[in-house]
Amino acid sequence: MTAVGVIRGTTSDRRVVIPLLRRLRSDEGQADPLPVWDELRALGDVVPAPWGGYFVTGFEACNQVLRGRNWLVPDFAWQERQPDPARWREPARREMTRTLSRLNPPEHTVQRRALGNLFDRGTLEELRPRIAAHVGRLLDRLATRLRDRGEADFVDTVGDRLPIHTVGQWLGIPDEHYPHILDFTHRQVHAQELVPTKSELAISAEATTEMRTFFTSLIAHRRADLGDDVLSDWIRYWDARYPLDRAAADQTLYDLTMFITIASLETTATLLTNAVWFLTQDPARADRLRRHPEEIDDAIDEVLRYDPPIHLNTRFAAADTVLGGVSVAKDTTVHVLYGAANHDPRRNPDPHVFDVHRKGGHLTFGGGLHYCLGSVLARLEARLLLTELLERFPTLRPAGSPTYANRMVFRRITSLKVTT
Ligand code: HEM
C-alpha cells in the first residue's frame, strides 16, 4: 500500500476521548460508528487513551503500527512488566494470551511456519463444494422461514451458521457440537474487550472452562483415531516436534485449534450479515450485482472496508519511538482503530459513501506478521453465499435495521430481520 498524507499529531487531553468511547459502545454508536470515528480522527492520528497509551486513528499511522517490526503484541512478558500484572492474570485473559495473536517472534514464527498457508488454492478448491452445499442448505432454511412467516432473522438462520459449518467440517467436528461452540464463543469474547467489567470476566471465565473441556476432548479423541484430516496432521506434527513432552504438544494443539475456530466465527458472521445489510438495502445495488456477479469480490471488499468485524487491535512499542510526531515510550500500548483508518479520507476519498467500485484500501484483516490467516476462507464463504442468495432471492431486503452487541473490539450483529 502506498503512503498517504502527512500523519497529524494529537490532543494532549487524556479525558477527551471518554465520552466518545462511551458513545462507541452504546446502541447509537454500534448502529452508526462513523461519526465517532470521524471525531476521534479529528483529534489527531495518535490520540491519548484515558488509561495511558494511545488510540491510532489515521490509515497511514495504523498501517505503520501493524507492519512495523518495532511494534509487538502484548504478550505474557509485557503483562508481567505492567504495574498491575494481576489485572492480566484472569483465566479468560491468560487463555487468549497463549494464542497465536498474542505471541511475538520467535514463538509466533514457529507456529505460523508450522501452519503454513492454511487455505492454499488446493485446500480452497476442496472446501468450495462443501461450503456451497452448506450455503444451499442454509438458504433452503431461509426460504422455508420466509414462506412460513413472511420474515426471517438472517443472523440466526444463515449468518451465524455458515462459518461454524465451514470451519467445523474442515476440522472434522461433528455438527451436534456447533450450537455449544457458538455459545461459548459469544461468551468468551468479553475477556478480549478493552475494559471488561468483573461480571463480564466471570462470564468469560466460565466459557473458557467449557471451551477448554471441549477442545481438549476433541484433540484426545482424534489422537486415538488419527485420520486424513487437518487436525490429525497437526497432531502428528506437534507430537513429532515434542517427542518427550506430550503436555507441550497438547497445549500447542489446544491453543491452535481453539483459536483458529473461534477466530473464524463472529468475524465471518459479521461480514456475511453486513454484506446482506449493505447490498440488499438498495434494490438497484443488489440487482446490478446479480447481473454482474464478477463484481461480487469488489462488493465484499467494500463491505469489509466500510464496517470491519474487528474494530480495534493492540500493539506496544518495543523501544522508544515516534508515531505521528508523538513520542511513544517503550512498552506503551497503542490501539489501532481499523474502522477509523478505513474511513480516513486521505486514503479513501468520500469514505462514508458505500461504493462497490471504489477499489479502496482497508486494514480489516490487519497487516504484517499477524495478518489474518483465514481472510481467503472468509472471502470464499461470502462469495458463495452472495452469489446464490442474490440469484435465489431477487427481492430479499432488510425488514429493519440490524441490532448489535455493545462491544468495542469484536463487532457482533445479533439480529437482522429480512423479508422478500
Ligand atoms: C471477515 C472475517 C475475518 C476478519 C475480519 C478477520 C480479521 C482478523 C484480524 C484483524 C486479525 C489480526 C491481524 C493483526 O493483528 O494484524 C486476524 C488474525 C487472525 N485470524 Fe482472522 N479474520 C477473519 C476471519 C478469519 C477466519 C475465517 C480464520 C480461520 C479460519 C481466521 C483466523 C485468524 C488467525 C489464526 C489469526 C491470527 C494470526 C496471527 O496472529 O498470526 N480469521 N483476523
Image: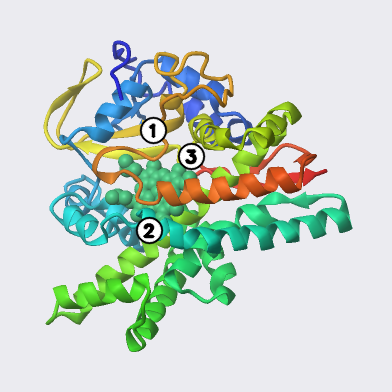
Q: Are marks 3 and 1 in contact (CB under 8 Å)?
A: no
Give the residue type at disc 1: Leu
Residue to which mark 2 is pinned: 122
Q: Is residue 312 above or below residue 7?
A: below
Q: Which mark is residue 408?
A: 3
Residue found at x 68% / y 34%? 291
Examine the image and state in which quarter residue 125 appears: bottom left
Residue found at x 51% / y 22%? 358
Whole-number angstrom distance, CA of label 3 to CA of label 1: 17 Å
Task: Please state the horizontal and vertical placement of residue 287, each as a whole percent of the image.
Answer: 72, 32
Whole-number angstrom distance, CA of label 2 to CA of label 1: 26 Å
Q: Is mark 1 within 8 Å of ligand 1?
A: yes
Which one is in front, 349 or 312?
349
* Nearer the camera: disc 2 or disc 1: 2
Give the residue type at disc 2: Gly
Examine the image and state in which quarter residue 97 appears: bottom left
> At numbered mark 3, what does the secondary structure look like: helix, strand or loop?
loop
Whole-number angstrom distance, CA of label 2 to CA of label 3: 36 Å
Task: Please state the horizontal and vertical placement of residue 128, each as a whole percent of the image.
Answer: 51, 58
N-terminal label among 2 and 1 = 2
Q: Residue extending furthest bottom?
A: 224
Q: Which mark is residue 401?
A: none
Q: Which mark is residue 363?
A: 1
Q: Residues within 10 Å of mark 2 (few under 14, many from 20)?
A: few
Is residue 219 left or right of 130 when viewed as pictured? left
Q: Is mark 2 within 8 Å of ligand 1?
A: no
Residue found at x 40% / y 51%? 374
Give the residue type at disc 3: Met
